[in-house]
């Protein structure tokens, strides 16, 4: 089914009228191409009320189009205006616009009047509105003498402005001599008429320069009224000045300035009326006087004020309703209220209306013999009168046309002919204005034509509507059909929409809608076609949107905006801040997907929007940046409720910088005792702004407050005023009281003194008391100054004492202090430990036992026992170096301990001493003991020298620590082939007195690996490894080179390589299928040769990886084959057992920590 053009809105009437109306609507949407004959159409004209600047040339616009091009004429004040007779008036070429040259000569007032333009051609005449031309006026104020005003405080006042009447009306404002606007408020404000109203005057209203200004915007001039002088005085001042100034002062009454209920200054009375035109702004005003100043409220009787169109101006004194309509008519009440009363004023509002269009007539194109209508419908209040003109002449007196019939607001045409072409004017007028519309009837017989350019390309985003234009013209009106593709059928109504202007709409365009579309226009005279093309593009999407961010001031923030778009389109990404451009600041950087802001400031907070657009679409995403920081410091600290031991502190919080304050920290300074030092006083919740603070006596307090939020702590506030509390006796005593002797015959009593804050008053002193704990002596006391120590002399050695220290000042004593126990001084112990025994545990460890000394002989506090031990030396050694003694200390009353880290096969001696706080007692007699043999360390070096074809010579140095008598050396070696596999291991014993050995009958050009270690009777020591290579036979090498150059040898090698590659592939496949891989054998190949499984029976080689072992070792860096260094001597350190030099043991004498065989190297 082919789709014809159908109207979207149908007009319902009887008979054939619906069809006629439909055709009229369709044609009205069409523009007649300018190459076709058509009546004139006014395209541009000056406004109806045209106010001109008298300083510039007058330009009255009138532009029109038509075919043939129209000619222009003018009327002025209803009569023909002959521009040829006035040399100052010219008409713009090709236009009807008048230019009146008044700048050279002439006056604007000469050309005031009502102008109307007529554009005419052979098809008809169009006329403009009546253009009322008036020059703007900005007259001066009339000269007047303004007397000074003297007024009593509290009285009402109206300062009149009464500006000169200008055109257009002036804008009024009040300023002073310095051109500063006078402040206005609920008490003082400017009325709609320009007067300045005072609900009551105050002394600060006194001034001599109340000046009313009138600004005339059209001429950009400002006129000024003479200044008005106002003096506000009290009643007493007023009585004194009446006699002297009554003759030359305007006096505004001598009423009392007592409070009074409201009275309206404007409007007067209880009711008034207001008329406004539809579409204008309705402004209602009520200004009242009274004391105190009244407040104004507005209501509408029997209705509500329109929410979206109502505004309050001038401190609620003016009610404005914009776009007012007839529905806004009614009674409005303004209510003035203060504490003494309330008054009301009712304003009855009537909304009238100048004519406005319901349906303006539209151009009508008909073919000969067709019918049509022109409709002109308007409304207004009162209802406008409709009149018709034909070519600018009332239709009643225009030439008769048999095809035309007028029926009120409608002209009906039937069976039109070419002579029926004309321009019709509809005039709708009432007392408030008029409307004038031109609409032509053009009778044409024209083939269809399509005005949209051929092969236009339309690009549309998927899932959006697509509109394909088919602007057309023809008379009779063509029908429109759309087709898709070269042989496509007409498009159907269920998927597509064909608009009355020919546009094809695809409501939801999809990818398969892409293609070529053909528009076909038909009437009875012919057919026209046009092809357009449609491409559907992927929509632009934001894959990664910017996210809400909270950043501390001075930090860095990054917003991400990842965009995906159709690859055939170019996308641009723009960043906005608060819907405006980003600040022009180098701190803002934009790359492909990110916006980065560094050194963030408070002003950077806001909404950041990423806008991605192509030529076809635009998407955006926004995120909020909240800039936070530590709070601003509190301020306005105030102290109230000041008592002896408490005070209330209040403050005003600073800005929380977008992070709520969680708490306030209060600190104090004691200016009397510790000026400049601030101490913690209290913390309160972040919702509090006051705190009750406990105070101490005799302190000169200052307080400061800090605020804290999740970001951190603010700077401190300014310090509060100082507040000094009264003195009192101390409420606490010194702490950390101790009694220890520094000499055998004294007792040193020490304590931590009170600080100035704790002294509670002047004259701080201490009463020091002591007596022997185990005696019946009375307390001995002494009062000392503000010190922290007192020495009691002549005491017995190490005797317990009871001690107490009490604070006092001029106000009295502190509470009774607590009693502590101390001791007089210690002396050195008198007796050495006895019965010292040594039990050798192994070659590096011995256990020592002793008997404790009597407690009385210690003469002090027992701290433990100390063992001195050293390695015995020969006479020659003692002469060479100082005897090195080692010390271990065992805490408390232990009677045994362990000596670790001894050297095997050595002679030692030791003694034991008791230790107290004063020092060591005498030493016990020396006790000798010896350690047994151990295993030796590795040989100091191993070198390979003098390699030949079949021999290698080994040289070595004995172990640095034999730890016994060497019995023999063991050498093990094995060959290494070219694939680093190890051959069979050969074991060889060498006498202990040898340091060189030659191995013969070796294979030429072969690498060997050697393992070498020494033995004592205890067992083998750590081994050292080395590698060596026998030399190469030059003749053999030459033959090998010759063979390597032979072709058969090269072919053989290639075959072997191919076979190996195949085997590797098979192994790889087997491994992927779960086959086993001989890792264990490879690991075993690197183990110590003593535990390495050797396949000696079949003579096969194990696997070998040279890693680092094949590299020759430097002296002092030998490592076993497992790449670990084994120390022959003990790794035990005295630090592992004691405190620094003095070892640490448990109460039973056992060593702290575990002692294992590993520590002795076994």
Image (cartoon, grey):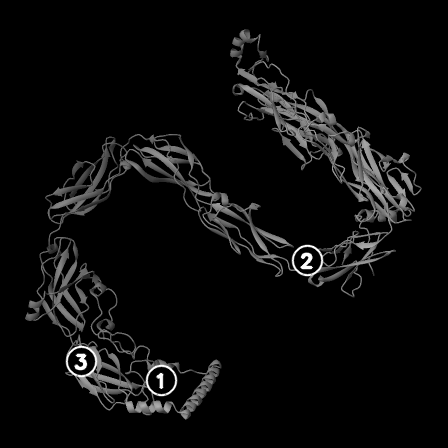
Q: Is residue 133 left or right of residue 1072?
A: right
Which of labels 1 and 2 is toward the front?
Answer: 2
Point out residue 103 in the picture as x, y percentages from the top left corner: 67, 29
Q: Which residue is mark 2?
A: 459
| Quadrant in which the N terminus appears | bottom right
Which is nearer the eye, 718 or 751?
718
User: Cα distance, mark 3 to mark 2?
Assistant: 98 Å
- Which element type, helix, strand or loop, lies under badge 3? loop
Nearer the camera: disc 3 or disc 2: 2
Is residue 573 left or right of 1038 when viewed as pictured? right
- Of pointers 1 and 3, the one earlier in the residue sequence: 1
Label 2 packing within 10 angstroms: few (<14), some (14-19), many (20+): some
Q: Quadrant of residue 3?
A: bottom right
Q: x and y percent of residue 336 in the render?
A: 63, 24
Q: Is residue 824 left or right of residue 691?
A: left
Disc 2 secondary structure class: strand
Query: Could you say which disc has been placed on residue 979 in the image?
Result: 1
- Compute the Cα span from label 1 to label 3: 37 Å
> For the view shown, which residue lies furthest in the right direction?
402
């Amino acid at each position: 089914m082919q789709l014809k053009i159908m109207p979207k809105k149908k007009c319902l009437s009887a008979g054939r009228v619906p069809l006629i109306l439909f055709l009229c609507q369709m044609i009205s949407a069409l523009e007649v191409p300018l190459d076709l004959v058509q009546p004139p159409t006014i395209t541009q004209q000056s406004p109806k009320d045209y106010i001109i600047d008298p300083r510039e040339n007058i330009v009255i616009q009138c532009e029109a189009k038509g075919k043939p091009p129209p000619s222009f004429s003018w009327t002025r004040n209803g009569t023909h205006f002959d521009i040829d007779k006035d040399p100052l008036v010219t008409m713009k070429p090709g236009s009807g616009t008048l230019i009146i040259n008044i700048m050279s000569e002439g006056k604007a007032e000469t050309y005031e009047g009502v102008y109307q333009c007529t554009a005419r051609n052979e098809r008809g005449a169009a006329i403009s509105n009546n253009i009322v031309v008036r020059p703007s006026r900005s007259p001066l104020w009339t000269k007047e003498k303004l007397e000074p005003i003297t007024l009593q405080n509290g009285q009402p006042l109206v300062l009149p402005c009464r500006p000169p009447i200008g055109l257009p009306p002036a804008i009024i404002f009040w300023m002073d001599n310095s051109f500063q606007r006078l402040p206005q408020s609920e008490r003082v404000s400017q009325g709609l008429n320009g007067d300045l109203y005072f609900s009551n005057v105050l002394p600060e209203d006194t001034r001599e320069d109340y000046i009313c200004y009138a600004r005339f915007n059209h001429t950009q001039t400002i006129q000024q009224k003479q200044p008005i002088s106002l003096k506000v005085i009290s009643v007493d001042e007023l009585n004194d000045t009446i006699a002297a100034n009554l003759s030359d002062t305007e006096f505004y009454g001598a009423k009392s300035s007592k409070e009074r209920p409201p009275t309206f200054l404007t409007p007067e009375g209880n009711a008034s009326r207001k008329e406004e035109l539809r579409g204008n702004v309705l402004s209602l005003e009520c200004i009242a006087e009274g004391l105190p100043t009244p407040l104004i409220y507005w209501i509408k009787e029997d209705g509500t004020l329109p929410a979206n169109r109502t505004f309050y101006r001038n401190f609620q004194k003016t009610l404005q309703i914009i776009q007012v309509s007839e529905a806004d008519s009614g009674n409005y009440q303004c209510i003035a209220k203060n504490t003494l009363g309330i008054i009301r004023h009712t304003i009855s509002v009537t909304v009238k209306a100048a004519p406005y269009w319901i349906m303006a007539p539209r151009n009508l194109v008909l073919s000969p013999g067709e019918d049509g209508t022109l409709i002109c419908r308007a409304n207004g209040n009162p209802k406008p009168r409709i009149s018709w003109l034909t070519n600018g002449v009332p239709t009643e007196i225009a030439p008769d046309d048999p095809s035309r019939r007028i029926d009120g607001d409608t002209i009906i045409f039937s069976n039109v002919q070419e002579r029926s072409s004309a321009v019709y004017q509809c005039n709708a007028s009432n007392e408030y204005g008029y409307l004038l519309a031109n609409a032509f009837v053009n009778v044409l017989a024209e083939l269809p034509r399509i005005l949209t350019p051929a092969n236009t390309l339309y690009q549309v985003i998927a899932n959006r509507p697509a509109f394909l234009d088919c602007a057309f013209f023809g008379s009779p009106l063509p029908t429109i059909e759309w087709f898709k593709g070269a042989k496509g059928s007409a498009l159907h109504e269920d998927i597509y929409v064909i608009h009355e202007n020919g546009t094809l709409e695809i409501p939801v365009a999809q990818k398969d809608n892409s293609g070529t579309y053909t528009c076909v226009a038909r009437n009875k005279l012919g057919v026209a076609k046009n092809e357009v093309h449609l491409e559907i593009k992927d929509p632009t999407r934001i894959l990664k949107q910017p996210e809400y961010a909270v950043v501390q001031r001075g930090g860095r923030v990054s917003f991400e905006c990842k965009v995906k778009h159709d690859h055939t389109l170019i996308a641009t990404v723009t960043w906005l801040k608060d819907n405006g451009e980003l600040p022009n600041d180098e701190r803002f950087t934009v790359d492909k997907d990110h916006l980065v802001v560094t050194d963030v400031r408070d002003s950077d907070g806001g909404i950041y929007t990423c806008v991605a657009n192509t030529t076809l679409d635009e998407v955006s995403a926004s995120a909020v940046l909240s800039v936070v920081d530590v709070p601003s410091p509190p301020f306005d600290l105030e102290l109230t409720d000041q008592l002896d031991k408490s005070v209330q502190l209040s403050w005003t919080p600073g800005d929380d910088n977008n992070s709520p304050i969680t708490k306030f920290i209060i600190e104090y300074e004691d200016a009397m005792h510790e000026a400049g030092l601030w101490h913690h006083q209290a913390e309160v919740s972040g919702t509090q702004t006051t705190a009750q603070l406990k105070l101490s006596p005799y302190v000169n307090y200052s307080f400061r407050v800090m605020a804290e939020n999740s970001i951190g702590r603010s700077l401190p506030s300014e310090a509060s005023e100082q507040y000094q509390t009264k003195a009192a006796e101390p409420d606490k005593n010194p702490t950390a009281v101790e009694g220890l002797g520094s000499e055998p015959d004294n007792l040193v009593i020490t304590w931590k003194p009170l600080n100035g804050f704790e002294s509670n008053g002047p004259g701080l002193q201490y009463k020091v008391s002591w007596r022997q704990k185990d005696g019946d002596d009375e307390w001995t006391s002494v009062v000392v100054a503000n010190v922290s120590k007192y020495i009691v002399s002549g005491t017995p050695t190490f005797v317990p004492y009871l001690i107490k220290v009490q604070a006092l000042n001029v106000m009295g004593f502190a509470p009774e202090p607590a009693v502590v126990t101390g001791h007089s001084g210690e002396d050195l112990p008198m007796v050495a430990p006895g019965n010292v025994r040594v039990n050798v545990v192994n070659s590096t460890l011995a256990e020592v036992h002793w008997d404790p000394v009597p407690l009385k002989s210690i003469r002090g506090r027992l701290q433990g026992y100390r063992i001195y031990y050293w390695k015995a030396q020969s006479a020659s050694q003692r002469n060479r170096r100082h005897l090195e003694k080692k010390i271990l200390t065992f805490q408390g009353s232990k009677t045994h301990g362990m000596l670790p880290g001894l050297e095997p096969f050595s002679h030692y001696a030791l003694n034991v001493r008791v230790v107290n706080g004063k020092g060591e007692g005498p030493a016990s007699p020396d006790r000798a003991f010896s350690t047994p043999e151990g295993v030796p360390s590795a040989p100091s070096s191993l070198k390979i020298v003098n390699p030949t074809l079949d021999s290698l010579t080994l040289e070595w140095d004995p172990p640095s620590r034999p730890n016994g008598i060497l019995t023999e050396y063991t050498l093990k070696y094995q060959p290494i082939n070219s694939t680093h596999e190890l051959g069979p291991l050969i074991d060889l014993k060498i006498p202990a007195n040898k340091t060189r050995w030659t191995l013969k009958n070796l294979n030429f050009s072969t690498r060997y690996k050697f393992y070498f270690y020494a033995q004592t009777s205890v067992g083998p020591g750590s081994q050292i490894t080395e590698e060596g290579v026998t030399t190469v036979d030059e003749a053999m090498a030459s033959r090998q080179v010759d063979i390597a150059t032979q072709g058969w040898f090269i072919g053989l090698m290639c075959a072997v390589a191919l076979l190996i590659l195949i085997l590797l592939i098979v192994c790889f496949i087997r491994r992927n299928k779960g086959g086993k891989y001989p890792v264990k054998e490879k690991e075993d190949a690197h183990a110590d040769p003593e535990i390495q499984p050797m396949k000696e029976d079949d003579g096969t080689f194990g696997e070998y990886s040279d890693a680092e072992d094949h590299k020759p070792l430097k002296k002092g860096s030998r490592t076993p084959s497992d790449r670990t260094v084994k120390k022959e001597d003990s790794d035990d350190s005295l630090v592992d057992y004691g405190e620094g030099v003095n070892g640490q043991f448990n109460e039973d004498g056992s060593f702290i920590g575990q002692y294992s065989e590993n520590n002795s190297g076994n």
